[in-house]
Amino acid sequence: AQSVTQLGSHVSVSEGALVLLRCNYSSSVPPYLFWYVQYPNQGLQLLLKYTSAATLVKGINGFEAEFKKSETSFHLTKPSAHMSDAAEYFCAVSDGNTGGFKTIFGAGTRLFVKA
Amino acid sequence: SAVISQKPSRDICQRGTSLTIQCQVDSQVTMMFWYRQQPGQSLTLIATANQGSEATYESGFVIDKFPISRPNLTFSTLTVSNMSPEDSSIYLCSVGGINNEQFFGPGTRLTVL
């Protein structure tokens, strides 16, 4: 069975500082991995996805994530935080083998950005 | 990507009543998905809706409580029946992309009194 663990329900950084949101996954088959962002009172928006191509994935708004199979991790980073990055971030995994869309979401990490 | 709209965006309902949520997609899709996001929590898949067949429900969700319609390839509805305060959540519909990514609607924020 697949699962996702996000370390830290809340992360607070200063504007301009590095953003690091941690995600570890469990999957018995090659996974598809995703990061989504949810701004207040909105639906989820895809930030980036890993689909077994390059292990370093670049997404929107300056975010990127690195797939590390040996560590079963897919941490999300951004070199310099902006106030507009304050939101809830969800890591997610789906089964890349069967073509199914069933997606398991992590519990989420709320990012706070201090001025 | 797909553009998805939902109606209503929010509602406040009395316990024991039912609410039907509509989801419209700007392109034809085979599968549509309904999720629940309880306050302060992550997303849980309720069911997968295929056009022309019965929806497939996840463990813990039943058709009598969450009936789903899928009359065509661009539209679906989810009904929350006989509501109780525990049904207060955000309900989201989504469609899938070519690499299993999900494209979400803006959500329906439901409060049950």
Image (cartoon, coloured by chain):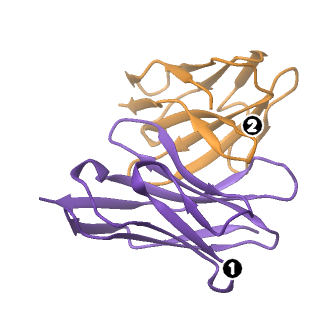
Chain colours: A purple, B orange
Q: Quadrant of residue A54?
A: bottom right
In screen coordinates, is B84 left or right of B24?
Answer: left
Query: Mark 2: which amino acid?
Result: Thr
In screen coordinates, is B80 left or right of B63?
Answer: left
Task: Give the image location of residue A34, x and y in percent.
Answer: 60, 56
Task: Give the total number of marks visible in the rendering.
Answer: 2
Q: Compared to B62, does A32 lie above or below?
A: below
Residue behind mark 2: B48
At horizontal 86% and vertical 59% (from top left) the residue drawn is A97
The answer to whether one can see residue B62 in this image is no
> In the structure shown, which secondary structural element does the residue marked by tag 1 occupy?
helix
Q: Same chain, marks 1 and 2?
A: no
Residue behind mark 1: A69
Most extreme residue toward the top is: B71
Q: Quadrant of the N terminus of chain B?
A: top right
At horizontal 36% and vertical 43% (from top left) the residue drawn is A39
Subunit bearing disc 1: A
| Mark 2 neighbour density, 10 Å: few (under 14) some (14–19) many (20 or more) | many
Subunit bearing disc 2: B
